Image (cartoon, grey):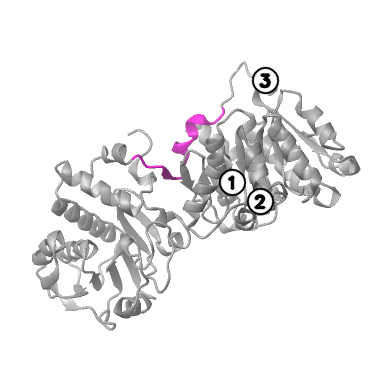
């Protein structure tokens, strides 16, 4: 099927309710959806684990209904299964009540000690719709389940489906089975780290539901942007691949700009030049080979450099310094209409006047802040997905909100959540290389949102390939391996 497949879409809880309603209105009744959900979850358990004593914890709603189906299927497969329900079975309604009647085993009361000797716990208590902290017996069971294998239905109880957050005790799952599509909470921290392996199960929801819902949030995977990746042609030449400029800082922080420049060159830019203060030029010259070098004394000299239309993309920020020179160069690059990447100091320098930066952004621009830098320009308070999307709309730039769950947002509302970054990328200079990769893709004409998404994913994939012991200097040299695989697929 064409992109995007449901398994790479992240629908909010409200959108998922709409998808269920759409399915019912188009001939797929709720009983069928629940039977498919529970049966699919049971199949995921059977394919992954050996038979063992199971306790299925069922809540009072549809999540609990899924639990009754799971228990029935596991028992039919010969597993020793017990089931405990929160509340009175007589108060179950709708499809959940139907599935409870089909369960032929005992329905135990949900108590803090009900797990007994169970080695595997199925958490079918609440799912993604819970908006309050776990308390009472469910909170006790979240703690009692530690050390046992936990399979969560939809999301681990206590985790919010829309943002992955929680406000109290939570179940920590080894496997989470969810239905039709992902939810943002499966991808955003800390939910991402509480879900274990996430398996998306087809329950029969018509794909045409996605046309009605028009999703804007995706998992950041190559099909989202691979078609826009720059490709070499036999008649091509280096000038057709863009000339990227990296504005360098002083002597003591020259490594940041140099690593960014190599990232841009490895990403495919035809030419890359470091434009640096005259006082630092000799230091840069001692370390650069394929990357070119020019001295730029002030903003006027920068404007002269930018007047050449062949120099089509600019990166400012890594190791640059928080000063008037940085501010002037940023505004000069934006005024010249260049494709621009702003990182680190080029973001921080506008912390007292973010409106001036936003007013100057007119063409393709990518901001790459970590959480601290993000807070210097934008308001927090909401979840990471929401604040990043709002930041992109407010600034007019594509915003790459970095972290273990990097969120990339475009001004038009499209968002992607990255989930392939290994913890080894938490090292000095890794962000500079990422900014350089974005620059290299922009210089070749890749659209800003796609370039940012591709750079973030490639950065994570390189980190995975290099593995433990990674330092920032390892990233750019390993990039051709990732690009080769992408372009040959």
- At 65% from the left and 48% from the top, the residue drawn is 354
Q: Is residue 11 magenta?
A: no
Mark 3 = which residue? 237
- Whole-percent x, y for residue 57 in the image: 25, 71
- Whole-percent x, y for residue 96 in the image: 16, 62
Q: Is residue 285 visible?
A: yes
Numbered disc 3: secondary structure: loop
Q: Which segment is the magenta one? A: 214-230
- At 75% from the left and 44% from the top, the residue drawn is 327
How crowded pointer 1 is (Cα within 10 Å; few <14, some 14-19, many 20+) is rated as many
Q: Is residue 49 visible?
A: no
- Disc 2 to disc 3, C-alpha distance: 29 Å
How crowded pointer 2 is (Cα within 10 Å; few <14, some 14-19, many 20+) is rated as many
In the picture, residue 299 is in which quadrant? top right
In this rendering, the answer to whether 112 lies above or below 407 is below
Q: CB atoms at circles 2 and 1 under 8 Å apart?
A: yes
Q: Which mark is residue 430?
A: 2
- At 27% from the left and 79% from the top, the residue drawn is 115
In the picture, residue 136 is in which quadrant? bottom left
- Disc 2 to disc 1, C-alpha distance: 9 Å
- At 23% from the left and 41% from the top, the residue drawn is 206
Numbered disc 2: secondary structure: helix
How crowded pointer 3 is (Cα within 10 Å; few <14, some 14-19, many 20+) is rated as few
Question: In the orientation shown, which residue stands out farthest toward the bottom?
Answer: 113
In this rendering, the answer to whether 23 lies above or below 150 is above
Mark 1 = which residue? 459
Compare residues 185 and 237 and report the one nearer the observer.
185
Going from the N terminus, do you reach mark 1 or mark 3 first? 3
Compare residues 425 and 182 and report the one nearer the observer.
182
Q: Is residue 220 magenta?
A: yes
Going from the N terminus, do you reach mark 2 or mark 3 first? 3
Compare residues 430 and 486 and report the one nearer the observer.
430
């Amino acid at each position: 099927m064409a992109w995007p497949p449901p398994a790479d879409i992240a629908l909010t809880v409200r959108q998922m309710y709409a998808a269920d309603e759409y399915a019912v209105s188009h001939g797929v009744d709720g009983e069928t959806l629940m039977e498919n959900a529970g049966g699919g979850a049971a199949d995921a358990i059977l394919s992954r684990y050996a038979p063992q004593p199971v306790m299925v914890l069922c809540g009072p709603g549809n999540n609990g209904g899924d639990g009754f189906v799971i228990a029935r299927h596991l028992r039919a497969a010969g597993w020793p299964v017990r089931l405990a329900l929160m509340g009175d079975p007589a108060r179950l309604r709708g499809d959940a009540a139907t599935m409870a009647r089909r369960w032929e085993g005992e329905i135990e009361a949900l108590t803090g000690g009900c797990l007994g000797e169970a080695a595997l716990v199925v958490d079918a208590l609440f799912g993604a719709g819970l908006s309050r902290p776990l308390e009472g017996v469910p909170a006790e069971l979240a703690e009692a389940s530690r050390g046992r294998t936990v399979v969560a239905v939809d999301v681990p109880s206590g985790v919010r489906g829309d943002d992955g957050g929680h406000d109290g005790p939570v179940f920590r799952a080894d496997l989470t089975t969810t239905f039709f599509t992902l939810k943002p909470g499966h991808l955003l921290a800390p939910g991402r780290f509480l879900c274990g392996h996430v398996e998306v199960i087809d329950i029969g929801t018509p794909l045409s539901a996605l046309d009605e819902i028009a999703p804007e949030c995706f998992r950041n995977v190559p099909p989202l942007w691979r078609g826009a990746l720059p490709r070499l042609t036999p008649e091509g030449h280096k000038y057709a691949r863009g000339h990227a400029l990296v504005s360098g800082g002083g002597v003591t922080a020259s490594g940041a700009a140099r690593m960014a420049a190599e990232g841009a060159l490895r990403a495919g830019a035809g030419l890359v030049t470091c434009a640096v203060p005259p006082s630092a030029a000799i230091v840069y010259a001692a370390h650069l080979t394929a990357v070119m070098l020019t001295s730029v004394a002030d903003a006027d000299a920068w404007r002269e450099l930018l007047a050449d239309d062949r120099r089509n993309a600019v990166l400012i920020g890594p190791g640059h310094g928080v000063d008037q020179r940085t501010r002037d160069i940023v505004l000069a690059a934006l005024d010249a209409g260049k494709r621009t990447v702003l990182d680190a100091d080029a973001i921080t320098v506008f912390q007292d006047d973010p409106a001036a930066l936003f007013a100057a952004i007119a063409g393709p621009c990518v901001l790459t802040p970590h959480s601290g830098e993000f807070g210097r320009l934008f308001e927090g308070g909401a979840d990471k997905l929401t604040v990043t999307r709002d930041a992109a709309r407010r600034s007019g730039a594509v915003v790459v909100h970095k972290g273990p769950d990097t969120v990339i947002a475009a001004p038009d509302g499209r968002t992607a959540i990255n989930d392939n970054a290994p913890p080894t990328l938490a090292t000095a200079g890794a962000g500079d290389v990422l900014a350089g990769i974005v620059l290299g893709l922009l210089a070749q004409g890749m659209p800003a949102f796609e370039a940012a998404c591709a750079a973030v994913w490639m950065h994570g994939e390189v980190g995975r390939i290099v593995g433990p012991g990674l330092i920032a200097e390892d990233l750019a040299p390993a990039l051709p391996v990732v690009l080769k695989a992408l372009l040959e697929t």
